[in-house]
Image (cartoon, rainbow, N blue to C red):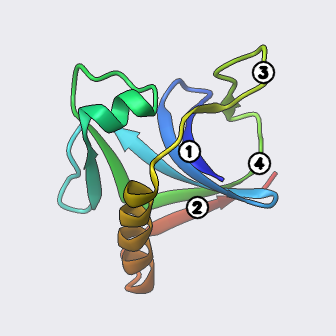
Amino acid sequence: MPGVLREADGKPADYVAVQDDVIILLIQSDPPNDNQSGIELTPDLKRLCGLPTDRTSWLITSEFNIDSWPNADMELVDHRTKSFVYGKLPGPTLGRVAKQFLELRSTHRAVGIHRPA
């Protein structure tokens, strides 16, 4: 179940949930620095995901967290439906993100933290 969520600190993040765990990739407005890799999100994609379009956004593929799903660090976007999800990444974009993330993981250039419940 891929999509975009909001963490409790108000920052959006990309995620892929697998059973009880979720892999979270940061979305930030600053371009990746020399130690990071990322994919710039287009305005159309940001609108689809419910993100503001007034500045650039980057999905960082070289850093990730693995958390329990859901957990206290995730903020509900819609309290009525109990949804954490802003929107969903379309298949081609998700494929591009996954490809870059898996390439970085296989060469040990993606750094992750497992945060158990």
Amino acid type at mark 4:
Trp
**78 is higher (above) or lower (below) than 91:** above
Residue linked to disc 4:
69
Mark 3 secondary-structure assignment? loop
Q: Amino acid at mark 1?
A: Gly
Q: Give the percent coordinates (x, y) of residue 93.
A: 38, 55
Q: Residues within 10 Å of mark 1 (few under 14, many from 20)?
A: some
The mark closer to the camera, 2 or 1, is 1
Q: Which residue is mark 3?
A: 81
Q: Earlier in the sequence, mark 2 or mark 1?
A: 1
User: Nearer the viewer's eye, disc 3 or disc 2?
Assistant: 3
Q: 61 or 48: nearer the eye? A: 48
The kind of residue on which mark 3 rests is: Thr
Name the image quarter holding residue 30: top left
Could you tell me how far apart the alpha carbons at marks 3 and 2 are, in whole angstroms? 29 Å
- Nearer-the-camera pick, 31 or 56: 56
Could you tell me if the residues under marks 3 and 1 are in contact, i.e. CB atoms within 8 Å?
A: no
Secondary structure category for the residue under label 2 = strand
Which of the two labelled residues, at mark 3 and mark 2, occupies the earlier sequence position?
Answer: 3
Q: Which numbered disc flags the more N-terminal residue, 4 or 3?
A: 4
Mark 1, residue position: 3
Residue at mark 2: 113
Q: What residue appears at the point 34 percent right and 38 percent down from the top-left corner?
A: 45
Is 54 placed above or below 93 here?
A: above
Q: Residue at coordinates 36% horizontally, 48% vertically from top-left?
A: 59
State the separation of the CA atoms marked 1 and 4.
Answer: 13 Å
Q: CA distance from mark 4 to mark 3?
A: 16 Å
Numbered-mark total: 4
- Give the residue at x 50% y 58%: 64
